[in-house]
Image (cartoon, grey):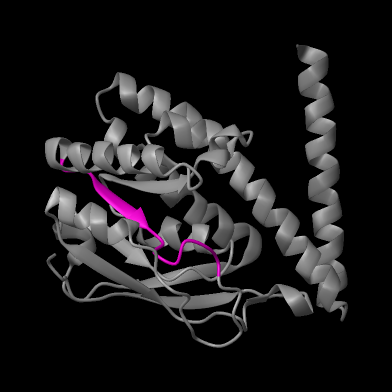
Amino acid sequence: MASALLYLEYILGGVVALTLVLYTMGAVGVPKAAFVARVVASYISLIICALYGAIASIFLRLAGHAQIAQWATARSFKYVMAATTGVAFDVEDPKGHLKTVRPAVFVGNHQTELDVLMLGAMFPKYCSVTAKSSLKHVPFLGWFMSLSGSIFIDRKNTKDAREAMRGASMEMQRKKQSVFMFPEGTRSYSKEPMLLPFKKGAFHLAVQAQVPIVPVVVANYSHILWIKDFVFKSGRIPVKSMYTAYP
C-alpha cells in the first residue's frame, strides 16, 4: 500500500512539474503549450474534485445531507479550477431564482466540456444533474456521480429513459430536489453564439413533476476555449439566470 501511494505521488509530482513547464513555455510565447497546460490542469482538477466528491457524498449521506453532495463538489471544482487555470464563471441571478426556486428544472446551453465548470459556479443546493448512462463507468467521475445521486439516462433505450425521468419527477416532488439538464443533449462547439435543436426530456420532466423551468444562459466563450485552434486562456465568463416559466 505504501509503495503504491509513493508511486502515485511520483506520478502526480511529475504531471504537476510538466504542467508548470508548459505554463512557463506559454508565458514566453508558445500558445499551444499554454493550451496543453490548461487541459492537463483541468483534468487533474476534475479528478481531485471527483475523488473529494465521492468521499464527501458518503459522509453527507451518513449525516443525512446527501442532497447537497453535488453542490458541495461543484463549489470545490469552481475554486480549484480558478486556481489552476485562471478560468471562472460570473453568475448573475438578479431575481434570486437559483437560491429560491425549488424544486425546478434548470436548463442551460451546452458549448464544451468547460460547462462542467459553469455548473461549479451556478449549481444551486438540493440539485442533481442528468447524464448519459455511460458516464457511470468512468473512473473517479462516475464514482462520484453514482454516489451523489445523478440521474443516468440511456439514450438508446427509450423505455429505460422514461423510467429514469419518471423516477426523477417523483424524487423532485418527494424531496424537493431540483434537476439541471442541457436540453441540446450534446455540446455545440460553436465559435459563434448558437443553439442546437432541443431534446424534449427537460420539458417532459417539468410537466411530469409540475415544477418551473429556469433557463440559465452562458455567454459564448470561444475566446477563452476554442479547441480547433488550440486556444485555452484564462478569463471570466458571464452566466445569467433568466425568468421562470411554468409548464
Q: Please check the rendered image and state whether residue 29 is part of the magenta-colored stretch, yes or no.
A: no
Q: Is residue 14 visible?
A: yes
Q: Residue at x 57, y 57 (%)?
A: 81
Q: Is residue 103 visible?
A: no
Q: Residue at x 51, y 76 (%)?
A: 236
In the image, 220 versus 43, the foreground residue is 220
Residue 13: x, y in percent? 81, 40
In the image, 227 versus 54, the foreground residue is 227
Instruction: Residue 225: name its quadrant.
Output: bottom right
Q: Principal SS element in the magenta part?
A: loop
Q: Please check the rendered image and state whether residue 178 is part of the magenta-colored stretch, yes or no.
A: yes
Q: Quadrant of the C terminus?
A: bottom left
Asked if residue 40 lies left or right of residue 76, the reply is: right
Instruction: Residue 122: name its quadrant.
Output: bottom left
In the image, 100 versus 142, the foreground residue is 142
Q: Residue at x 26, y 36 (%)?
A: 167
